[in-house]
Amino acid sequence: MSSAKAKTIATREAKNRRTRIVATIGPASDSPEVLRKMADAGMDVARIPLAHGSIEDAIARVKRVRETAPEVGILADLPGPKIRASEFPKGGVVLATGSEVVLGSSEEIKESSANAIGVSNPDIVAGLEEDDLVAIGDGGVSLRVISVTGKGIKAVVRAGGKVQGRPGVTVPTSRVQLVTPTKEDLERLHALVEVGVEMVAISFVRSAADVESVRRAAGPEAPLLCAKIETPQGVLEIDRILETADMVMVARGDMGVRLPLEDVPHIQKQIIRSGVRYGRPVITATQMLESMITSLVPTRAEVTDVANAVLDGSSAVMLSAETAVGVDPVNVIATMSKIVERSEENFDYITWGNELGAQQISGPSSAPERITAAITSAAWRAAVEQDAKAIIACTSSGATARAISRFRPPMPILATTPYQRTAHQLTVSWGVDSLVVQKVKSTDDVVWFAVQAAVDNGYARSGDVVVVLAGSPDEANPIADTLRIVRIA
């Protein structure tokens, strides 16, 4: 066995975790040294936020990730119509409960302080009324408007706390009309498409039309589009959004300030179930290990939150400020990985697949996805009954691998694809490992080379049974319609 092959097998055996980890890149994780360590610790997808800094900064991060950790997928996050405060001084300030602050346009208040807060959208400030509640950041700090005069808006701090950077500002929905995507989003999107980013998240998605607008703007080389659900309208329209989006994010931060907090855990479960029903990867995000921004260990409640997200069926769990500005991004990822692996030990794979078996992917009965749903359902059952060593999904677009992934099979899922872009897009899919293989001209060759790749990379050996899903290599007809059970000689 060659040393390169041995390394491939050792790496795969060391990574038993199947729920993926998305880590946000920021000042604490920008260096090539830290990025490489983050990937080694378990980062599957690097999230590049565009809410802070220029598009040039974001593209530089994309290139740095590709050069340093080429196996990691990239998810660029469009900020959408986010209302933000003017920047607070370095190190932040404490807004004391009961103190008074002035709210004004960021053009007038260029730097926020404990006494005055600038708001990026002047129309929002002008539209505020007495007794309106204003949330800062993820809602931990909140204000109540006490007077509106020609001299400005005065508010009292209802719940105090530390604020830093340029936190979001949330006002009553009746005071703001969100438009997604924004003009700035589309300008950033074009730059991201040019550098070949594989996945793009859309903020504040309220309807399928929001996703369709981004897809049209992206053109024929559109990346996978992730709909971030964080508004009441997005929750109500989740099924229609999932018909259009490629993946979905449970964005609990903004959701928690726009919806009652007690509803958020139940909405999380609803979105995960809906995403699985449509065969879409689901990312659960926000404040998962929040205390690790400054601490080397998480709280018990955070550990339980991550575990429950895994047991709910999340495809991936996401770290935000913990890795972007936290004290030890590598330690955070390693901690998340351990929590996830332990949670997966208690995941009931067989019951999950049995309950899903009768439930085909939602959508029109004539849709090609329904054929893929039927064949992957049969593949899951065959793999379980034959005690298969692995399920191999031969795929050009990644759709076949995503469809079998929703069954959460107990054995490895190996996606073989001729495209590196597809391999990167599958880094967010539960349990899917990808191998880039040569492009061939017949279904027989597709299956043969896929099985050979599985053997060469340690997924199976002589005497093992594998289940193979394939279709015609003709990209004009990409439907997976072939199921083979192969005993390796």
Image (tube, helix red, strand yellow):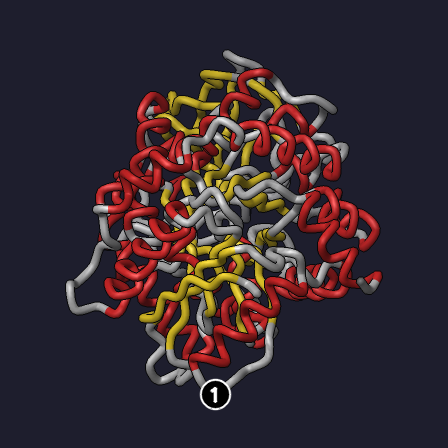
Q: Which residue is drawn at 70% across and 63% down?
A: 70
| Left or right: where 102 falls relative to 232 | right
Viewer-proximal residue among 395 and 159: 395
For badge 1, the amino acid type reads Lys
Regarding residue 121, the answer to whether it shows in the image is no
Which residue is identified by label 1? 441
Q: Which of the 4 image quadrants contains residue 348?
A: top left
Viewer-proximal residue among 485 and 153: 485
Q: Which residue lies furthest to the left in this view?
A: 365
Q: Judge whether 190 appears above or below 120 on screen.
A: below
Query: Where residue 65 sits: x, y (%)?
Result: 71, 59
Viewer-proximal residue among 434 and 97: 434
Check disc 1 and report its element: helix, strand or loop. loop
Q: Which of the 4 image quadrants contains residue 474?
A: bottom left
| Left or right: where 4 falls relative to 196 | right
Query: Where residue 335 sits: x, y (%)?
Result: 67, 30
